[in-house]
Image: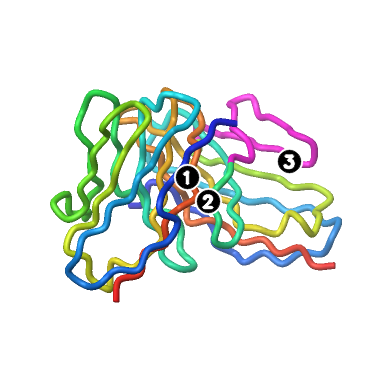
Amino acid sequence: RKEVEQDPGPFNVPEGATVAFNCTYSNSASQSFFWYRQDCRKEPKLLMSVYSSGNEDGRFTAQLNRASQYISLLIRDSKLSDSATYLCVVNRNTGNQFYFGTGTSLTVIP
Amino acid sequence: GAVVSQHPSWVICKSGTSVKIECRSLDFQATTMFWYRQFPKQSLMLMATSNEGSKATYEQGVEKDKFLINHASLTLSTLTVTSAHPEDSSFYICSAKTGRNTEAFFGQGTRLTVV
């Protein structure tokens, strides 16, 4: 079973829409969680960390449900510049591995 | 944010030769470094994790004798693809983090083409 499962999409949404991505992880020893963004042929860049209490950064909201072992990302008022692949990441406490989900492709349409 | 420099950004080599890729943390000491491989339209697949003071831990299915990882110092890790074959052509990317429960910073990646 994969460490991290993520719906690959693609998600094609109009500007201004709200879109949500979910991600599940298999190992309860996973300690910390992140959302990264990757543009085509570029390296991933951190979008936000995910805290147990949930956290918000402008139009982006991340949530963690440890009991169900899933992570979510909500993007409100989508912009054209939000078009990218969004990757969820889990960091295992034991071994300190940093595993990526398959990524969800988002295209925001004018 | 912290800077990770990866070199070279692209390389073309002949089948059977070896290629070395360098990854440097420029402004921080990396207690852990990671190497990933990414094929077109796929996600990053973790190849190995290298923690400070210990040898790299390879993921299942990754040949450690083919992909040699050396975490020479807290600021430098190298990946050597030995006896490269066309199926090794891929985007290789390194990342580094300063400790547990912290984010990882990524190098720019190396696009390897084996002909």
- Secondary structure category for the residue under label 2: loop
Q: Tell me if label 3 and label 2 are in contact, CB under 8 Å.
A: no
Residue A64 part of the magenta-drawn span: yes
Badge 1 and badge 3 both on one subunit: no
The magenta segment: A46-67
User: Which residue is depicted at the point 58% across and 26% down?
Assistant: A52
Q: Nearer the viewer, residue B90 or A92?
A: B90
Query: What residue sits right under mark 3 in the picture?
Result: A60
Dominant secondary structure, magenta: strand
Q: Amino acid at mark 3?
A: Phe
Q: Tell me if label 2 and label 1 are in contact, CB under 8 Å.
A: yes
Query: What residue sits right under mark 1 in the picture?
Result: B107
User: Which residue is depicted at the point 43% across and 46% down?
Assistant: B6
Disc with the residue nearer the chain's start (3 vs 2): 2
Question: Which numbered circle lies on residue A43?
Answer: 2
Q: Quick check: A11 above or below B9?
A: below
Q: State the image coordinates of residue A62 (x, y, percent, origin top left).
A: 66, 37
Q: Nearer the viewer, residue B83 or A45?
A: B83
Query: How many numbered callouts?
Result: 3
Q: Quadrant of the N terminus of chain B?
A: top right
Residue A65 part of the magenta-drawn span: yes
